[in-house]
Image (spheres, rainbow, N blue to C red):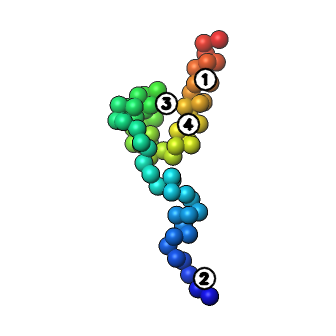
Amino acid sequence: MNRGYTGTSYYISIGESAMKPLQISPETALKLSKSLNLPLEQIMHMPTPVLLRKLAEAEAKEKGNTK
């Protein structure tokens, strides 16, 4: 029985979506960078679930300030 690293188990364990860059336009990335006050490079390399969470937090904060 071979218990060595096969090279594929790593990708299966983290999921293929973790390997893809965000599918957004440069203009959208710039707008997100400004609205979230984060560097553009961080936006482009941020995992989608993290970006969505930050957007939800920013929206909740904005709604809290307008009340």
Quadrant in which the C terminus appears: top right
> How far is the residue under mark 2 from the one under mark 4?
38 Å
Does label 3 or label 2 sit earlier along the sequence? 2
Does label 2 or label 4 sit earlier along the sequence? 2
Does label 3 or label 1 sit earlier along the sequence? 3
Q: Which residue is mark 1?
A: 61
Local SS, label 2: loop
Vertical relation: 10 (above or below) 43: below
> How far is the residue under mark 3 from the one under mark 1?
11 Å
Residue 36: image tag:
3
Local SS, label 3: helix
Residue at position x 55%, y 36% in the image: 52
> How far is the residue under mark 1 from the one under mark 2?
49 Å
**Which residue type does callout 3 highlight?**
Leu
Q: Which residue is mark 2?
A: 3
Local SS, label 1: helix
Vertical relation: 7 (above or below) 33: below
Question: Left or right: 48 with respect to 26?
Answer: right
Residue at position x 42%, y 42% in the image: 23
Other-residue count near label 3 (Cα within 10 Å), few / some / many at <14 / 14–19 / ≥20: some
Quarter location, residue 49: top right
> How far is the residue under mark 3 from the one under mark 2?
45 Å
Question: Left or right: 27 with respect to 61?
Answer: left
Q: Are marks 1 and 4 in contact (CB under 8 Å)?
A: no
Residue at position x 56%, y 27% in the image: 58
> How far is the residue under mark 3 from the one under mark 4?
11 Å
**Which residue type does callout 4 highlight?**
Leu
Q: Are marks 3 and 4 in contact (CB under 8 Å)?
A: no
> How far is the residue under mark 1 from the one under mark 4?
14 Å
